[in-house]
Amino acid sequence: MKKRIAVLGATGSIGRSALDVIRADKEHFEPVLFSANSNADALFELATEFSSAKIAFSGQLGTDRLEFFGVDRRRVYSGYNGLLAAIDDAGAELTLNGISGAAGLRPSLAALEAGSALALANKESMVMAGRLVLETAAIRSLPVIPVDSEHSAVFNLLRFRDKNALKEILLTASGGPFRMWNADRLKKARPEDALAHPTWNMGAKITIDSASLANKGLEVIEAARLFSVEADRIKVVVHPQSIVHSMVRMADGAVYAQLSWPDMRLPIHEALHYPDMARSAWGVLDFEGLNLTFEKPDFERFPMLGMAYHALRAGERYTIAYNAANEYAVDAFLGGKIGFTDISVLCGRVLNKEWGGEASDLQAIMDTDRLARESAAALVKGLERQV
Ligand code: NDP
Ligand code: MG
C-alpha cells in the first residue's frame, strides 16, 4: 500500500525538494494534495503530472486560468479557507507542511484534525503554537515529525535513546552570509547580500532569517517546544560547513551528532518514510577532505538570537510576538523600507511591550500575532525615515 501524502507549499523550496523525494520513491508514495499561494502555473503542472491529486490554490484564481489549464474543477480548491477544506478532504496519512510563515499554522492544525501525521517544516507552527499543535496531535495519537534539518537530526538522534538522559541540545548554525561582517558593514547590508546564503538554498524569508540569526532564534524556540527542553539546555554552535546538523549531549557526557551534506531532501525523506528507515541517495557524506570547524555565536552583532532566548523565557505570547515582528520586519527590509540592522531594532521594540503569558487557544494566538504586527507597523514608521 502506498502512503497517501499531502504536500503543502508544493511550489516552494521545501515543496520542490519533497517532490524530488516523492518522484524518486513513487512505489511508496501517492500524492493526494498539493498547495500553493501565488504560483498557479507550477501548481497546475503538478496537477497534470499527478492526475489523481487534489490541488489547493490559496490565492485567488480566475476561472479563465482554470479553463486554460483544463483541470477538473472538482479537484481544485481556492482561497485560504479552500486550502483548509482541501486538507480536510484529502484523506492524507501524512501531511508535509512547507508553507512559509504564520500562514502555516492553521494548515498544521487542520492536517492533524483530519487524522493525518504531520511532517513539519513550517517552524512557525511550533514557535506560535507548539503546545496546541502537540496537544492536537497527542489527542489523536499522531506523530509530529520535524523536517527542519536541526530538529530532524535531534529527533532521529533521540529516537533510540532514553530521553530522560538528555542533558542538552546543541543546535548548529551556519552563521549565514554575514558571519565575518563587522557591525558597520552590517548596517549597510542589502537584501541581495542577505539572500546569498553560503551553504543552503532556501526561500527568501528563511534566508534573511539565517543572515540575522533569527532563524536560529526561531529554531531554539522550536526545539524547546518539540523536545520539552528549557532554554538553558539548548545551545547554539556556529558550524560554517553545515555538515553536522545538530548534536545531543547525554547525561554521561557523550555527544551524538548527525552528519550529512546540506540537502533538505534527506530530512524530508526521513519524515515521509517515518517510522521506517528507507534507503536514499540524499546527503550521503564522503569524509575525504572534510574540515569541520565550530565557533561561538556572536550575540552582539546578531541580537535576534538573544532576543529569541528572552522571548522563550518570557512566555508563549512573547514567542508569538517575536515571530510576527520579525516576519513584518523582514518584509520591510526586503521591500527596501528599513535597513538590515533595523530588523532587530524593530523586534526589540515590539518585545519591550507587555505581551502577557500563555496563549490559551488559537484565538489568543492569532490575536497576539495580529497585535504584534500592528505594533511593528506603527514602530516601523520611525525607522523608515532613517534609511
Ligand atoms: P518558500 O518561500 O520557498 O515557499 C513557501 C511555500 O508556501 C510556497 O509554496 C508558497 O506558495 C506557499 N505560501 C506562501 N505564503 C502562503 C500563504 N499565505 N498561504 C499558503 N501558502 C503560502 O519557503 P521555504 O520552502 O524556504 O520554507 C517553507 C517553510 O519551511 C518555512 O517555514 C521555513 O522556515 C521552513 N524551512 C525551510 C527550509 C529550506 O531549506 N527552505 C529548511 C528548514 C525549514 P507560492 O510559491 O505559490 O507563493
Ligand atoms: Mg534549520
Image (cartoon, helix red, strand yellow):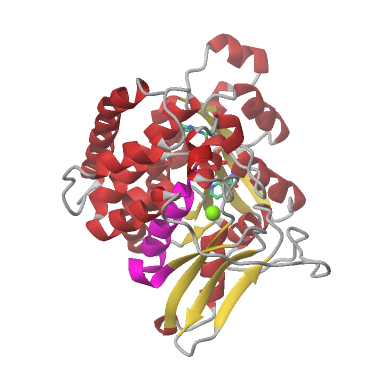
Question: Which of 386 and 310 lies nearest the eye of the viewer?
Answer: 386
Q: Is residue 12 in sight in this rendering?
A: yes
Residue drawn at the location 41% of the way across and 46% of the way down? 124
Q: Is residue 189 left or right of residue 330?
A: right
Residue 334 counted in the magenta span = no
Question: Which of 220 and 304 lies nearest the eye of the viewer?
Answer: 304
Residue 32 occupies quadrant: top right
Residue 365 occupies quadrant: top left
Query: Is 45 drawn above or below residue 281 in the view shown?
Result: above
The span picked out in magenta is 212-234
Q: Position of residue 3 (x, y in %)?
A: 61, 55
Residue drawn at the location 26% of the way across and 44% of the way down? 351
Q: Position of residue 21 (x, y in %)?
A: 70, 51
Query: Is 127 drawn above or below residue 88 in the view shown?
Result: below
Q: Please, what is the dominant secondary structure of the magenta stretch? A: helix
Q: Is residue 114 in sight in this rendering?
A: no
Name, please, the residue furthest toward the top: 64
Residue 231 counted in the magenta span = yes
Q: Is residue 126 left or right of residue 236?
A: left
The quadrant in which the C terminus is found is: top left
Q: Position of residue 171 (x, y in %)?
A: 50, 64
